[in-house]
Image: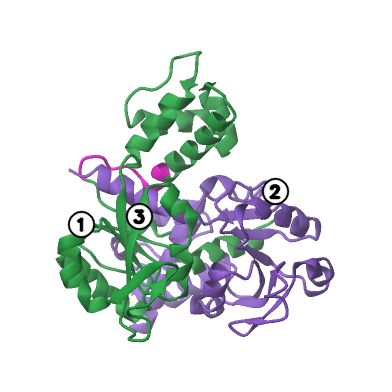
Chain colours: A purple, B green
Amino acid sequence: MNEFTSPRLSVKRIADSTVRRLSAYLRFLEDFEQRGLSTISSEELAKRGGTTSAQVRKDLSFFGSFGKRGLGYSVPELAGRLREILGLGKEWRVVIVGAGKIGAALVQYRGFRQRGFNILAAYDNNPEKIGRKLEGIPVRDIEQLDKDVPREHPDIVVLTVPSDQAQAVVDRVVRLGVKAILNFAPTQLHAPADVAVKTVNMAMELEGLSFALTNRD
Amino acid sequence: MNEFTSPRLSVKRIADSTVRRLSAYLRFLEDFEQRGLSTISSEELAKRGGTTSAQVRKDLSFFGSFGKRGLGYSVPELAGRLREILGLGKEWRVVIVGAGKIGAALVQYRGFRQRGFNILAAYDNNPEKIGRKLEGIPVRDIEQLDKDVPREHPDIVVLTVPSDQAQAVVDRVVRLGVKAILNFAPTQLHAPADVAVKTVNMAMELEGLSFALTNRD
């Protein structure tokens, strides 16, 4: 992921890494909930997350006060608050631009729907794909975006087009009012400051591993 | 990505976020190289990366001294050094376990080969897939791992199996000596401290966007 293309929030400047930890805390809390645990200390959350309890408290302090000294956090309360903070209470409308293999893999990814991310449609410019279905999702002509976006108001556009087409799609959907883009094209994208762009760079992830392998004892 | 499953390097404890920035700096430098620029200041690198020049200098300081005060960094020199730090000088041998849609998307991902990640084979437990090819890469029986890993020494295992099978594959390849895993299953994995595990969590990326959309002005 590219931390450099993260959204500039003018109210709360929360680092991407903090938001990621919040997502992870929520996962642990949901696991605790399933196991019937009602309270958890910052130490336990930290241990589970491989971080420090000071970091846990600092991360949560951005969003008000949680937990009682010595009693820990209420698991359902903190989980509920984190869902709220992460915007998981509502349903997010997602469209995928690029009906290739990555698009297909994403459409069938169960984690999305579980979290309230509802994929409305996929778009492509390949006449052989247009009109077909991608794992049950209709593939529409990319030209239709101009008509569909103002009517269907997708919240998030997932970009899985080739690198050399990515910026043109960004410009197009930004012009149509889209404010959040998840980009899988291995290229740097430019968008206005009020548009959140996240780039998933697979090669960069592998580089993290090659770094680890190279810098071993 | 999950920063919590990052490798514990006992020599150099470098944060995942630092390694990611190094990857990004390298991309910018390669872009500058292509445009024929020979030097760059930390300010320019910072501006391109949406970070501060102090951060750039701090990130690079982990790895010795670079650049000359007032003269900036030599673009080819710094790019070369970053490639070295990130372990991109050598070829990394990669196998994919799970020959589904994500596996197929990864096999055809050009960014991997460009960076020296060489995909040797894919593995699956589905008899209909075994013996076929996935974008030109042979799909082998997952049982063959026990024989192949000691012989072919893959450096990195990419895991694209369903969540409930992921830990068993991790245990298996760890026992066979694999030290780096890139995991696409939306689950928490356990591995010994000397094994680097990175989890690509697509839903977590979308949560970063829903957070940004929720916490707007």
Can residue B186 be seen here? The reply is: no
Mark 3, mark 1: which one is toward the viewer? 3
Amino acid type, callout 1: Ala
Magenta-highlighted residues: B10-19
Q: Is the Cβ of the residue at disc 1 closer than 8 Å to that at disc 2?
A: no
Give the residue pinned by disc 1.
B193
Left of B150 or right of it: where is A7?
A: right
Left of A177 or right of it: where is B208?
A: left
Please provide percent x and percent y for residue B36. 57, 25
Q: Is the Cβ of the residue at disc 3 closer than 8 Å to that at disc 2?
A: no
Amino acid type, callout 2: Ala
Tag shown at residue A191: 2
Q: SS for tag 2?
A: loop
- Seen at 43% across and 19% down, the residue is B67
Q: How far apart are marks 1 and 2 (CA)?
A: 40 Å
Can residue B122 be seen here? The reply is: yes
- Mark 2 crowdedness (10 Å alpha carbons): few <14, some 14-19, many ≥20: some
Left of A199 or right of it: where is B8?
A: left
Depth check: B199 or A71 in front?
A: B199
Q: SS for tag 1?
A: loop
Q: Is residue A43 above or below residue B38?
A: below
Predominant SS along the magenta part? loop
Amino acid type, callout 3: Asn
Please provide percent x and percent y for residue B173. 21, 67
